[in-house]
C-alpha cells in the first residue's frame, strides 16, 4: 500500500516538524528534538508536570494532546516503538519543577519497561517523579486481573482529567489518587474490521476474512479474543456494551460518559452510527450517557475498526473532563452532549 513520506528514518521527525510549525503558539520542540512540549510551561512555577513517552504512528494521541489543560510534554519514539529511557528522562528533566511530575505509561511492554526505567533514573537524580500505569482493555486480561490489561483509548480520560486537575493546582499525591480512580472507573473494548499497514514494512498488520471482525484486537495488531461474522452494527454494539457491563456493571441512572474511538480507517458516519447504537442499548439499562467523545484519536494508521469506552465519573471528574484546554487535537467536549 502507498504511504506518503520522505524516508523511513525521518518519519517521526518530519511529522514533529509539521506539528510544531502548525501550532507555534501552543507547542515547541524541546532541547531533545523528539520532545514536544508546551510553548509556555507553568511547571517551573508550582504546577505538577504531566507527560508521556510513546511510539508514533497512533496520532493524534499523544502528541496532539500537548497544550494547556492537558499534557506538558510528549516524548516521541520511533514508529510503533517506545522512546528510550534516556530520551524519556530528557523530557522529564525539561518540564519538571519543584511540584514534581507524573509520567503516564500506557501498559504495553516496551512502554512499561522504558517508562519505569526513566522514572527511576529521574528519581535517582532528585526529581519527584511518579509513574502512573494506564490500562482499560477488557479483552487483554480477565476480570480480577485488571492490572495486566493493555492501555487502550479509554486512557484518554486520564489524559484530560489529570491535565485539567494539574492546571487547577492539585498536588502530586492527589493527582496520583485521582488518576487511579479514573482508571478504575473506565473499561474499553475494541473491534478490528480491516488491517492497518505498517509504515516501515508496507505489510498489512494482520489478515481477516471479509465476512469477519476481530474482537479485542490491540493497537499494534495484538491478537483479539475472538471473531464474529459481520452483521448489522447494532448487533455488534449490543454485544460489546454487554461485555463492558458484565466486566464492570453500571447501575441505572449512574452518570456515564461514552468514548467512541475510530482506529484510523473508520468514517465519522460509521462512528456516529455506533454512538447511536451505544446510547440506544445503554438506555435499556437505564443509563443515559452525556458529554461524549467521538472521533479517531488513538489510531493505528488506516486500520478499520473502533472501540467503545465507558467511564463513570464523580462530579469532580466530570468537571475536569469538561474543563477548557488548548491542546490542538483534543476535542472540546459538549457539556450537553448525549
Image (cartoon, rainbow, N blue to C red):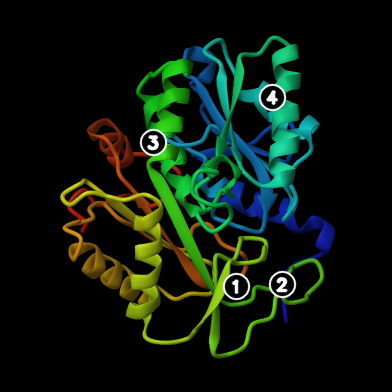
Q: Position of residue 46 (x, y in %)?
A: 47, 13
Q: Position of residue 244 (x, y in %)?
A: 39, 58
Q: Secondary structure at mark 3?
A: helix
Whether label 4 touches label 2, CB < 8 Å? no
Whether label 4 touches label 3, CB < 8 Å? no
Among the 4 quarters of the image, the one containing residue 15: bottom right
> Which residue is pictured at 52% across the width and 20% down the height?
43
Whole-Å distance between the Cαs marked 4 and 1?
33 Å
Is residue 149 or residue 39 the one in the foreground? 149
Mark 3 Cα-neighbour bin, 10 Å: few <14, some 14–19, many ≥20? many
Q: Earlier in the sequence, mark 4 or mark 1?
A: 4
Q: Is residue 32 left or right of residue 318?
A: right
Whole-Å distance between the Cαs marked 2 and 1?
11 Å
Q: Secondary structure at mark 1?
A: loop
Q: Is residue 87 above or below residue 236?
A: above
> Which residue is pictured at 56% across the width and 10% down the height?
98
Q: Position of residue 105 (x, y in %)?
A: 61, 38
Is residue 121 or residue 207 the one in the foreground? 207
Q: Which residue is mark 3?
A: 161
Q: Which residue is mark 1?
A: 302
Q: Which mark is residue 205?
A: 2
Q: Which residue is mark 4?
A: 119
Is residue 130 or residue 87 the one in the foreground? 130
Q: Secondary structure at mark 2?
A: loop
Amino acid at each position: 500500500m502507498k504511504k506518503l513520506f520522505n524516508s523511513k528514518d525521518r518519519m517521526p521527525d518530519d511529522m514533529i516538524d509539521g506539528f510544531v510549525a502548525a501550532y507555534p503558539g501552543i507547542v515547541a520542540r524541546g532541547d531533545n528534538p523528539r520532545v514536544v512540549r508546551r510553548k509556555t510551561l507553568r511547571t517551573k512555577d508550582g504546577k505538577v508536570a504531566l507527560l508521556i513517552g510513546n511510539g508514533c504512528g497512533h496520532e493524534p494521541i499523544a502528541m496532539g494532546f500537548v497544550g494547556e489543560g492537558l499534557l506538558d510534554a510528549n516524548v516521541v519514539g520511533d514508529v510503533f516503538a517506545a522512546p528510550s529511557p534516556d530520551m524519556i528522562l530528557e523530557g522529564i528533566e525539561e518540564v519538571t519543577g519543584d511540584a514534581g511530575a507524573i509520567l503516564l505509561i500506557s501498559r504495553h511492554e516496551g512502554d512499561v519497561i522504558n517508562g519505569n526505567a526513566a522514572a527511576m533514573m529521574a528519581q535517582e537524580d532528585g526529581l519527584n517523579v511518579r509513574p502512573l500505569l494506564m490500562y482499560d482493555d477488557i479483552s487483554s486480561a480477565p476480570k480480577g486481573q485488571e492490572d495486566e490489561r493493555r492501555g487502550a483509548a479509554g486512557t484518554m480520560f486520564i489524559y484530560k482529567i489529570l491535565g485539567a486537575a494539574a492546571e487547577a493546582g492539585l498536588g502530586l499525591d492527589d493527582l496520583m489518587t485521582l488518576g487511579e480512580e479514573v482508571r478504575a472507573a473506565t473499561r474499553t473494548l475494541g473491534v478490528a474490521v480491516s488491517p492497518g499497514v505498517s509504515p516501515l514494512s508496507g505489510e498489512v498488520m494482520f489478515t481477516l476474512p471479509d465476512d469477519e471482525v476481530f474482537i479485542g484486537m490491540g493497537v499494534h495488531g495484538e491478537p483479539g479474543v475472538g471473531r464474529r461474522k459481520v452483521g448489522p452494527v447494532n448487533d455488534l454494539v449490543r454485544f460489546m456494551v454487554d461485555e463492558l457491563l458484565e466486566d464492570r456493571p453500571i447501575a441505572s441512572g449512574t452518570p456515564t460518559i461514552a468514548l467512541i474511538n475510530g482506529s484510523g480507517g473508520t468514517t465519522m458516519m460509521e462512528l456516529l452510527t455506533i454512538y447511536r447504537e451505544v446510547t440506544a442499548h445503554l438506555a435499556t439499562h437505564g443509563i443515559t450517557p452525556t458529554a461524549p467523545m467521538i472521533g479517531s484519536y488513538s489510531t493505528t494508521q488506516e486500520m478499520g475498526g473502533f472501540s467503545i469506552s465507558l467511564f463513570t465519573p464523580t462530579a469532580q471528574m466530570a468537571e475536569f473532563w469538561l474543563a477548557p484546554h488548548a491542546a490542538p487535537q483534543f476535542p472540546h467536549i459538549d457539556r450537553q452532549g448525549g
